[in-house]
Image (cartoon, rainbow, N blue to C red):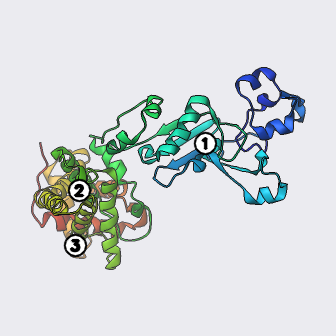
Amino acid sequence: VEECPVQDDPLSVVDPEVSRTHPPCPICQSRYWENGQPAAEPERVPVVRKYLKEGYGFARVQGSSEVFPDHLTGVINIHKLEELGDPTSPLILEPGKLLQANRGVLLVDEVGKLPLGTQNVLLQALQEGIVTPAKSRETFPAKFVAITTSNLRDLDNITEPLNDRLSNVYIEWSREHSNNLKIAYLSEVLRIKGPAYPRIYLEAAVYLLENWRELGVDVPELSEVGSNRTMMDIVSRGWAYAQMEGRWRVELKDFRRGARDALYGRIRARGGDSFLRNEEIVSTFLKENLKEAIEEGYRTWWCSFHTERLGSSPALEMEVKEFLRSALKGKGGERTPAVERFLQYLKRVEPSASMLDEESLIRLAAETSEEVSRGENIPCKG
């Protein structure tokens, strides 16, 4: 129904059968009902097609201790109250998230962080499909599909009645390297103009977090260290260091500092000696795994090309590496077919390829590979 704040079904204001199971909101009742029954002619009810978007059939709630019940149910619009002068009119209500999601989807992120009173309001909507806003005499429809998320440590904060009405689906961290790499690509710095971020270090960031997860460190204060956000944070912080120091690309020292800061930054603060002990755990991990992750990043970057595009040929591999050495010296090497394949590979896999010309792309590959390998051969596995 056009101008309905909760997206009422048009049939609910014209068809008595539909109105019994899906009664319209008080506002539509005041406009189209008489004596408690639908009275409008169908052709006189304005209808509009709406697509789900924020505030219209879709609403998002970020769980926190400051989300109070009226955030979900709605608040009094002072301007409408002054205009109408009737504090009992349903027209003065500014719909909350539950009403905005009517006939659509409600997303509650971190549901376990909602206060008890707010969870009870959500429970009422899920049980009855209706909501009675505070300080209101009217009941509004609130039927929606609720999608909620929670970290494991907050599950105990979800009330039992509310949890009974939710189907629990446990989603663990992905064990597929390719999927984790896609998550790392979500980092915003890879899409804005600034220092080029080499694929080698992107791979290394993923390997570093995968190694942490395999350790299975059972310390609550370290539960966030292995999160997907940490993976993206490694990328963002390394990029920021290069940006602050005016470098054209992220260098090895930028990546190292970014990885260190990202992992340390995820340690949940605690008093006493526990924070220092957890910092020591992370520090020891970095000392033992950072170099290996960087080498594994290089190995994946180079060996994928070597096996897929060069057929693991040592002679063709030498052609490409000689070309890169020439590029480091500022000389233009011979553009053999193997080199051309390498350039096409770089354009496909390097995160910054779309922002670099061909010469800069070659320089990026040459400098980064030399920086990591230090002129030594890092063999492909298998």
Could you say which quadrant of the image residue 77 lies in? bottom right
Residue on which the image places disc 1: 98
Alpha carbons under labels 1 and 3: distance apart: 60 Å
Indicate the quadrant containing the C terminus: top left, top right, bottom left or bottom right: top left
The label nearer to you, 1 versus 3, is: 1
**Which of the two discs, 1 and 3, labels the residue nearer the N terminus?**
1
Q: Name the residue under label 3.
A: 328
Badge 1 crowding class, 10 Å Cα cut-off, few under 14, some 14 to 19, many 20 or more, is: many
The front one of 7 and 26 is 26
- Name the residue carrying label 2: 204
Does residue 310 appear anywhere in the picture?
Answer: no
Task: Compute the Cα span from label 3 to label 2.
Answer: 23 Å
Q: In the rendered image of this protein, does residue 159 appear above or below residue 63? A: above
Residue drawn at the location 62% of the way across and 45% of the way down: 73
Decide which of tag 2 and tag 1 comes sooner along the chain: 1
User: What residue type is disc 2 on?
Assistant: Ala
